[in-house]
Amino acid sequence: MSSSIPIKDMKILCIRSGNRCAFPNCNTLLVKDKTNFDVESIVADMAHIKGEKPKAPRYDENMDVKDRNSYFNLILLCKTHHKIVDDQPNTYTVEKLHEMKTNHEKWIIDSTKKEVINVSFVELNTITKYLVSGQSNVIESYTIITPKDKINKNGLSDEVESLITMAMTRVNQVSDFIDKCPDIDFGKNLKQGFVHEYNKLKNEAGLIGDDLFYALLNFASGKSNDFKEKAAGLTVLVYLFEKCEVFEK
């Protein structure tokens, strides 16, 4: 993994890859959970699709350095499969690696969508615990517009729209969960947590569009790698999206 890769591109790659190896039928988790004593351990390789250096596999001398180290030229792999794709560049061509990456990211999305119907109060309770604690008191005014108009205004793709559409079937469950919470400030604190993270991701990290949505989804699910918990985070995010608590109006 090269230190010349911008932090922003590293985050986008890990989030879109679901912290898993993109090699077909591998899907090994590459971010190990933190312990009581230490932070998470990242065991991933952010492999270059077109090689980073002149003698590297699939190197393209006409490629700009910035593009070479961008998300679009990277694929998340375990160390074993990183070695395989670099040892066999005639088999794992630029086109093959892009196809592999696209299929893997689609699998992450589809796996999350499949779990939306299985989200219960158990998962909602799990992923909202940290969201409502210790957040800054950010209160903003929002004007309601239709979700479709909001999707267009924020430049969200058809792929993200399909996620939003699926999760909207469960937003009433989120509303019910919030209404039944004994903490009367729960809903307000949940909103504040998301607004705070939204502003940080947008203004400090410089994320927009789909990248911003996926980063907020990662936040909403507590950075969980469990697809049911990711689906629960998606329903909470879309609940706030629909109410215009986050994203441009």
Image (cartoon, grey):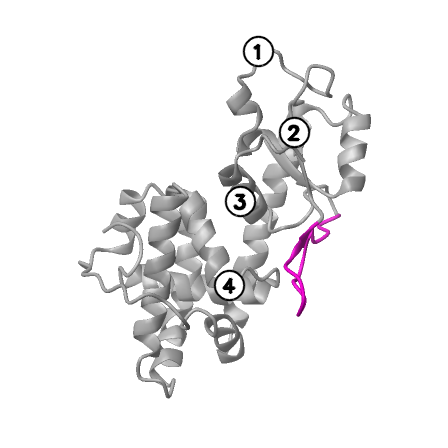
State which region is magenta.
Answer: 26-42
- How packed mark 3 is, by other alpha carbons closer than 10 Å (few <14, some 14-19, many 20 or more), is some
Q: Earlier in the sequence, mark 2 or mark 4?
A: 2
Quarter occupied by residue 174: bottom left
- Residue 60's place in the image compared with 189, above or below, is above
Residue depth check, mark 1 versus mark 3: number of the one nearer the observer = 3
SS at mark 2?
strand
Q: Residue at x 36, y 79 (%)?
A: 178
In percent of width and height, residue 87 lies at 82, 27
Q: Which residue is mark 3?
A: 11
Residue situated in front as seen by the camera: 180 or 3: 3
Q: Amino acid at mark 4?
A: Ser
Look at the numbered discs 2 and 4 and tell me whether their residues touch, using CB distance below 8 Å: no
What is the C-alpha distance between the residues marked 2 and 4?
Answer: 28 Å
Q: Earlier in the sequence, mark 2 or mark 1?
A: 2
Q: Which mark is residue 221?
A: 4
Outermost front residue: 37
What is the C-alpha distance between the residues marked 1 and 4?
Answer: 40 Å
Say left or right for 118 vs 20: left
